[in-house]
Amino acid sequence: MAYRIYLDPGHGGYDNGAQYNGRKEKDDALQLALAVGQILSQEGFDVQYTRTTDVYQSPTEKAQIANRNDADLFVSFHRNASAIPGTYSGVQTLLYDDSGMKAYMARNINQELEGVGFTNLGVSVRPNLAVLRQTKMPALLLEVGFIDNDNDNAIFDQEFNEVAQAIARGIIETLREFQPRTGYSVQTGLFRNYANAQYELERLEQKGYEANIVPWRDYFAVRVGIVDTLEDARILERELNSQGYDTLIVKELEAPNQSATQNP
């Protein structure tokens, strides 16, 4: 699948965003979005931008641009700020709700940025933000460090290429996870809470199983293996049943963030 990714450099024009010692959020956002977009383009993704110059667009206009052009993913770039400079530091990803592929991707990006040196502040649900509420596709808003924190700015500037690579990796690896799959897997749990799905996954991996967390509608499914035949899936299911798992055989025919066909 050729994903069309819309990258949104936050703010722009007369809207500087957060500012600190002459530094403007709108400039950092544009610089980073263009760098991430270049990496994604080199990997074969169809990358578009809400802006590539210093112009103002309302949050609603940004969402509408992506909607009109049938985007598959929307990522908005920002820098955070605190009331008292230097109080906070770290990266955070904002979502309309904590479900589906975007929730999986948010955690991947945060983890990659943590590896560059940022503190990982996790995921926050913000349903009131227009670029998250009004977009029709999965949408994320990245707060890439605090613009009023000298250490965060040092990471942003000195490790800029690594920061861009980290964000691109988080996006690419998630999208590859969501490529269409064929075959059968055995589902051991369906969770609304991501942490519970992660706990189930870790338990299975400790027992030597190859398992994945698959966002499915508003839930997170934990699925073991992917085999070619229904009979192989039934063998795996009986093995998991013997260890106390309640299971469901799933036929993987679609991208895992969509619906799945259940088999008897």
Image (cartoon, helix red, strand yellow):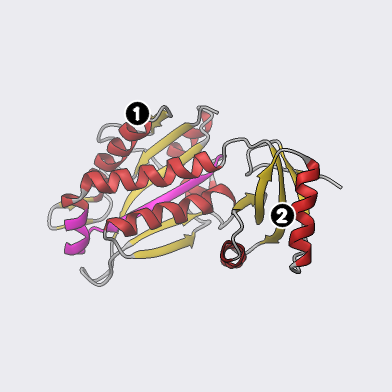
Q: Position of residue 55 (x, y in %)?
A: 28, 35
261 or 140, which is in the foreground?
Answer: 261
The residue shown at (38%, 59%) is 92
Q: Which mark is residue 104?
A: none
Q: Position of residue 121 (x, y in %)?
A: 38, 65
Q: Is residue 139 covered in magenta?
A: yes
Question: Could you tell me which secondary element the residue under label 2 belongs to?
Answer: strand
Q: Which residue is mark 1?
A: 42
Q: Which residue is mark 2?
A: 187
The amino acid type of the residue labelled 1 equals Gln
Mark 2 neighbour class, 10 Å CA radius: few under 14, some 14 to 19, many 20 or more? many
Distance from the alpha carbon under mark 1 to that under mark 2: 35 Å
The amino acid type of the residue labelled 2 equals Gln
Which region is colored magenta?
137-155
The image quarter containing residue 184 is top right
71 or 105, which is in the foreground?
Answer: 105
